[in-house]
Image (cartoon, grey):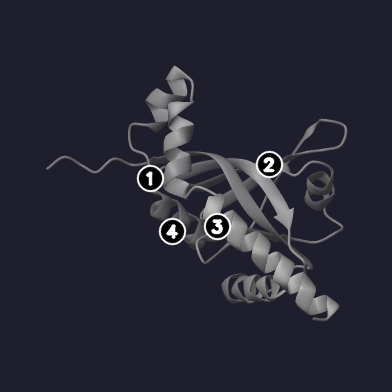
Amino acid sequence: YGDREKASLSETARILFVRRFLPDLGDIIKKTLAGASPHSRNVFSQSPMTGEEVLDLLSKGGLQVMATVKPDGTPHIATTGLIVVDDRIYMGMDSVTKRYKNLKHNPSFAIMVAEGWKRQTIIEGEVNFLDMQSQLAHTVGEAQKKRYGWTTHLLAEITPRKIFTWKTPPKSQ
């Protein structure tokens, strides 16, 4: 194999490992609620979304805001654009942005996605930057272009560790 094929194989192995051992979003939502403070558990367990509903919200948009931490420890927040491919969450950015610099220094983040008061999710986790020469980066870049009409120079996969969700409860009959 050449260098490109080896890089692609190693990324493929990483993706298969992550997909095999990373719990699905529904399991992360349940685990987050179980470990939450009594107040958060009370608020977010009233009408939680399923993992599928979270992916639907992320795919359709709404306001998407990401918080990162600057190297000096102060917070940074900015709108973002998320991309869902094969039930995995990705984001794009360029190397000149504060977000990129912050995430290279500290890959931890928090994202809030809100469709008004109808549906909301808060995701905490880490990002892993993609090899931009890989087939995965090409696939995600195509999805980004289809959704937004443009692509960014860099892409990262989002690995959720905590997920809080809320949706408007169904009206009683």
- N-terminal-most mark, 3 or 1: 3
The quarter of the rendered structure image containing the C terminus is top left
Q: Quadrant of residue 16?
A: bottom right
Q: Secondary structure at mark 3?
A: helix
Coordinates of residue 96 in the picture (x, y in percent): 87, 57
Judge left or right: residue 157 versus residue 45: right
Q: Which residue is mark 4?
A: 56
Residue type at mark 2 is Phe
Q: Secondary structure at mark 4?
A: helix
Judge left or right: residue 101 versus residue 136: right
Q: Which residue is mark 2?
A: 109
Q: Which residue is mark 3?
A: 19
Which mark's residue is nearer the viewer, 3 or 1?
3
Which mark's residue is nearer the viewer, 4 or 3?
3
> Relative to residue 1, is residue 159 depicted above or below?
above
Residue type at mark 4 is Asp
- N-terminal-most mark, 4 or 3: 3
Coordinates of residue 45 in the picture (x, y in percent): 36, 31
Mark 2 touching mark 3, by CB under 8 A?
no
Which mark's residue is nearer the viewer, 2 or 3?
3
Coordinates of residue 17 in the picture (x, y in percent): 61, 57
Q: Which residue is mark 1?
A: 49
Residue 133 visible, this angle: no
Q: CA distance from mark 2 to mark 1?
A: 21 Å
Q: CA distance from mark 4 to mark 3?
A: 19 Å
User: Seen from this angle, which residue lies furthest front?
Assistant: 1
